[in-house]
Image (cartoon, rainbow, N blue to C red):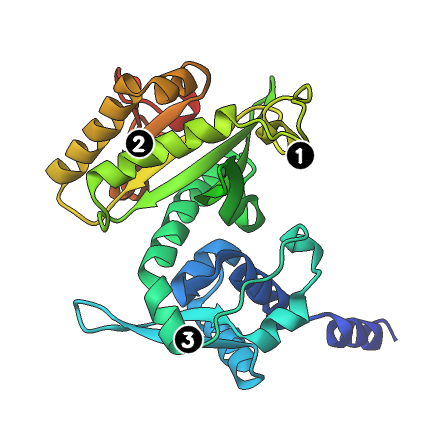
């Protein structure tokens, strides 16, 4: 009898694929596009690639996911997966997404246009997630929200590549850290990249006014509605030779020093820049970040 009960309990227990499928859908709804390898590192870092592939292909057969093909320089074929509209309908309202609507991609053409930048943002996320696992900190797939948008006045909006939530833990304390993430693949001019700092400075100072002829007392900057403290601003650079990336970091530092609004932001908010390949090789918790106010390189938590 005990033996039969054991068989029954195994039959009723969900398989790894059953428990993984909804997480894959949620991860694609959250992160937009990811490769099979990225999803494995994100969701099952000790699991097999074959399990992820089996789940993804099963979801594709059901019409919930699809992929666009990346042709790498070494001629290997990599699938970049995304959520279809049917997949988005399945997970809409899922608590893991924190109230944000899932993000479907409508075609392989649309996916191919978004893929290079989106995958670079996922690469950046994975460096923090893997560093958190190494150090016993808290940062997972749902602690990284892409494309966070805020009004900055005059009908304009700031759109950060991602907002990161990270809890650094030690026996003595728990530090809840937040950061706006900007991933630069060297596809825009260095001047346009540095100008992004002005947008963050505008958000830092922006106080919305109620409509009407009289100026009403302000409730404070709008960002206080979402954050107890203004998040750090972290620039992550890739896509060019190291000397060129260092020049772009220098331009970010020059903007921080010379623009009055940005200099004011820098007195209150931690600003830093790092090269993505350094994060992947050493981890973001190592001294690989250049403070935009100047000084020695350091971990991002010590900017």
Nearer-the-camera pick, 17 or 204: 204
Q: State the image quarter where residue 107 is shown.
A: bottom left
Label 3 crowding class (10 Å Cα cut-off): few <14, some 14-19, many 20+?
A: many
| Picture quarter with the C terminus | top left
Cα separation between marks 2 and 3: 32 Å
The answer to the question of whether label 2 and label 1 lie on touching residues, with beta carbons closer than 8 A, is no
State whether residue 81 appears in this view: yes
Label 2 crowding class (10 Å Cα cut-off): few <14, some 14-19, many 20+?
A: many
The answer to the question of whether label 2 and label 3 lie on touching residues, with beta carbons closer than 8 A, is no
Q: State the image quarter where residue 223 is shown.
A: top right
Label 3 vs label 1, nearer the camera: 1
* Residue 146, percent from left and from top: 49, 50
The extreme front residue here reads 213
* Residue 20, percent from left and from top: 60, 66
* Residue 160, percent from left and from top: 44, 43
Residue corresponding to mark 3:
67
Residue corresponding to mark 2:
273
Examine the rendered structure and indicate whether residue 145 appears above or below residue 212: below
- Mark 2 or 3 closer to N-term? 3
State whether residue 45 appears in this view: no
Residue corresponding to mark 1:
211
Q: Is residue 54 left or right of residue 188?
A: right
Task: Name the residue at 27% across, 25% down.
Answer: 255
- Mark 3 or 1 closer to N-term? 3
Q: Is residue 283 left or right of residue 171?
A: left
Element marked by disc 3: strand
The answer to the question of whether label 3 and label 1 lie on touching residues, with beta carbons closer than 8 A, is no
Task: Name the residue at 35% across, 63% down.
Answer: 115
Element marked by disc 1: loop
Q: Is residue 198 left or right of residue 10?
A: left
């Amino acid at each position: 009898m005990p033996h039969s009960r054991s068989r029954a309990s195994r039959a009723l227990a969900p398989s790894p694929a059953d428990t993984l499928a909804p997480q894959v859908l949620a991860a694609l709804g959250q992160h937009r596009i990811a490769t099979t390898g990225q999803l494995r590192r994100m969701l099952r870092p000790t699991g097999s690639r074959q399990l992820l592939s089996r789940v993804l292909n099963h979801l594709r057969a059901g019409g919930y996911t699809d992929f666009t093909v990346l042709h790498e320089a070494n001629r290997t074929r990599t699938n970049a997966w995304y959520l279809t509209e049917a997949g988005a309908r399945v997970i809409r309202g899922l608590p893991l997404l924190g109230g944000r609507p899932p993000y479907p991609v409508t075609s392989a053409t649309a996916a191919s246009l978004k893929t290079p930048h989106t995958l670079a943002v996922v690469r950046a996320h994975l460096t923090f997630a893997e560093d958190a696992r190494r150090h016993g900190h808290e940062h997972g797939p749902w602690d990284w929200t892409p494309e966070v948008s805020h009004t900055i006045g005059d009908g304009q909006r700031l759109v950060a590549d991602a907002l990161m939530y990270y809890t650094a833990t030690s026996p003595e304390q728990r530090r809840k850290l937040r950061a706006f993430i900007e991933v630069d693949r060297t596809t825009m001019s260095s001047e346009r990249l540095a100008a992004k700092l002005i947008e963050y400075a505008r958000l830092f100072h922006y106080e919305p006014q109620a409509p009407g002829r009289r100026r009403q007392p302000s409730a404070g900057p709008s960002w206080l509605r979402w954050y107890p403290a203004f998040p750090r601003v972290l620039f992550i650079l890739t896509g060019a030779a190291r000397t060129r990336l260092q020049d772009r970091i220098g331009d970010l530092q020059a903007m921080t020093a010379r623009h009055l609004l940005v200099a004011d932001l820098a007195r209150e908010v931690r600003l830093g820049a790092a090269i993505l390949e350094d994060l992947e090789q050493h981890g973001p918790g190592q001294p690989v970040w250049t403070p935009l106010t100047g000084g020695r390189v350091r971990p991002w938590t010590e900017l």
